[in-house]
Each structure stands twice: as C-alpha cells, then as structure tokens.
C-alpha cells in the first residue's frame, strides 16, 4: 500500500509542476505573439506564427484546466486518465513551441 501512496504522491507533484509551467507558458506564447508582430518581416510567416502561438496557448491553458480537474477529482481511475491527457497535451504543446521558434528564427534570417 505504501508503494501506491508514494506513486500517487509523485504523480500528484508532477501534475502540480505541469500545472504551474503550463500557466507560465501561456504568458510566453502571448509575449511571443507580440514579439513576432514586431520583428516578422514577411506577413505570411507572421500570420502562421501567430496562429501556431495562439493554438499553443490554448493547449497550455487546456493543460492547466485538466491538471486542476485532476487535483479535484476523487475517482482514482479518472484522475489517472486526466494525468495521462495532461502529459500528452503538454508534450504536444512543447513540440508546437519548438516549431514556432523555428518559424520565428526563419523569419529573422
């Protein structure tokens, strides 16, 4: 039983970190949209970058909401599914952030 409690505590702490980081990444996305508007030289690249950043912000906010939901639920099976979903969405959002960074770097060249 102690192993299950330890695993649950570790997963709770990890989800708590993802919750905080996701909230911060929303701010990063919004800041990047502003910076992209200032420095982008090609309207097409600016538009694509803005759209990706907006989608990325939505993914990070979704991670925040689902993380919070997982904190509040008392059903272990649902909590496990929510945590899996948060993990998947967070990784997708991070990959999308890398794509956006590549687009910004390409626009600056």
Image (cartoon, helix red, strand yellow):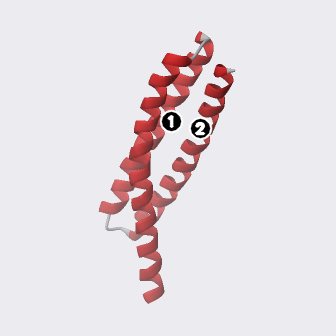
Q: Farthest residue to the bottom: give it.
A: 1
Please provide percent x and percent y for residue 47: 55, 17
Identified at 50% across, 32% down, the residue is: 55
Identified at 45% across, 37% down, the residue is: 28
Identified at 34% across, 55% down, the residue is: 69
Which is nearer the eye, 40 or 12?
40
Taking the image as shown, residue 8 lies to the left or right of residue 103, namely left
Classify mark 2: helix, strand or loop.
helix
Position of the N terminus, as image quadrant, is bottom left
Mark linked to residue 96: 2
Query: Is residue 77 something that shows in the picture?
Result: no
The residue identified by callout 1 is 56
Identified at 57% across, 44% down, the residue is: 94
Please provide percent x and percent y for residue 12: 41, 67
Circle 1 Cα neighbour tier, 10 Å, few/some/many (<14 / 14–19 / ≥20): many
CA separation in Å, label 1 and label 2: 6 Å
Classify mark 1: helix, strand or loop.
helix
Circle 2 Cα neighbour tier, 10 Å, few/some/many (<14 / 14–19 / ≥20): some
């Amino acid at each position: 039983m102690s192993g299950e409690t330890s695993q649950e505590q570790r997963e709770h702490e990890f989800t708590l970190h993802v919750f905080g980081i996701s909230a911060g990444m929303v701010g990063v996305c919004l800041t990047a949209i502003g910076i992209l508007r200032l420095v982008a030289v090609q309207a097409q690249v600016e538009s694509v970058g803005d759209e990706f950043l907006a989608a990325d912000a939505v993914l990070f906010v979704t991670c925040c909401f689902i993380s919070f939901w997982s904190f509040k639920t008392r059903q272990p099976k649902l909590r496990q599914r929510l945590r899996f979903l948060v993990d998947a969405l967070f990784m997708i959002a991070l990959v999308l952030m890398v794509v956006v960074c590549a687009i910004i770097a390409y626009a600056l060249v």
